[in-house]
Amino acid sequence: MSADYQEKFGTSSWRPADGPWIEGAGSQLRNLSRWGAYSALTVDPVDDCTFWYVNEWYPVQAQSSWQVRVGAFSLECPVHVGDIDGVSRNNGAKWVARANIKIHHAATEQAVTGATVTVNLQGIGSRTCITNSSGVCQVQVTVPDSRPQVRFSVTNVSAVGYTYDAAGNHDPDGDSNGTTIVVVQP
């Protein structure tokens, strides 16, 4: 990792996607005036955080017969809450409050699968849930009828290769501020 990279991005966001890259031990012995013609650095459209690099290289010194090496590296991508919806239903002398939480990839707004979402239920404690293939998880609690509402607040989202950006939280239907929703007794 170069000093320039460390200055700009720090060391914590560097994640080699396919392990260490291989350094070529050789060089081209004759001038073919085309070195680098088969080189590219491209952003992966799937996550907008992985960079793919392809270039020519020589394992040993040679006149020609270079080889191609492909490598990738990733930066941690931000994720945020893209929607929180509240649901309530009666259950005898108690009632059930539930929050459905959707986690989005910040750059693409695509669903994030397998994210662990930590939610604080005011006066009750914390719960976690893991997002499904639609990027949604649910936190549910049963409370006595004497409790008129339950406040659900997302306090953290963690997933491999992602960082939680709470400032990006939003809710398209406006029933929450993207971080907290109050579910009222039915």
Image (tube, rainbow, N blue to C red):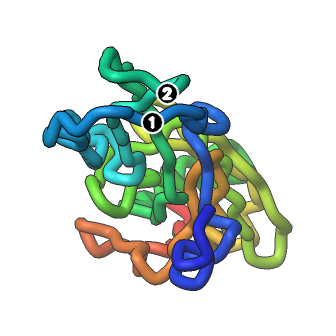
Do the CB atoms of the residues marked 2 and 1 lie less than 8 Å apart?
A: yes
Q: Quadrant of residue 124?
A: bottom right
Residue 64 horizontal side relative to residue 33, left or right: right
Name which of mark 2 and mark 1 comes first in the sequence. 1
Question: In the drawing, does residue 31 fall left or right of residue 140?
Answer: left
Q: Residues within 10 Å of mark 2 (few under 14, many from 20)?
A: some
The picture quadrant where one finds residue 176 is bottom left
Determine which residue is flagged by label 1.
Answer: 27
Report whether 115 appears left or right of 39: right
Q: Is residue 38 above or below residue 102?
A: above
Viewport quadrant of the N terminus: bottom right
- Percent x, y of residue 59: 53, 24
Instruction: Inspect this view and state whether residue 152 appears.
Output: no
> Quick one: SS at disc 2?
loop
- Between the residue at mark 2 and the residue at mark 1, the CA separation in whole angstroms equals 5 Å
Q: Nearer the viewer, residue 101 or 133?
A: 133
Three-letter code, disc 2 = Gln
Residue 116 visible to an observer of this rendering: yes
Pointer 2 residue: 61
Q: Position of residue 31 (x, y in %)?
A: 23, 39
Q: Residue at x 59, y 49 (%)?
A: 161
The residue closer to the viewer here, 19 or 95, is: 19
Q: Residue at x 69, y 44 (%)?
A: 92
Q: Secondary structure at mark 1?
A: loop
Residue sticking out furthest to the top: 65
Q: Is residue 80 left or right of residue 22?
A: left
**Residue 6, position in %: x, y?**
61, 76
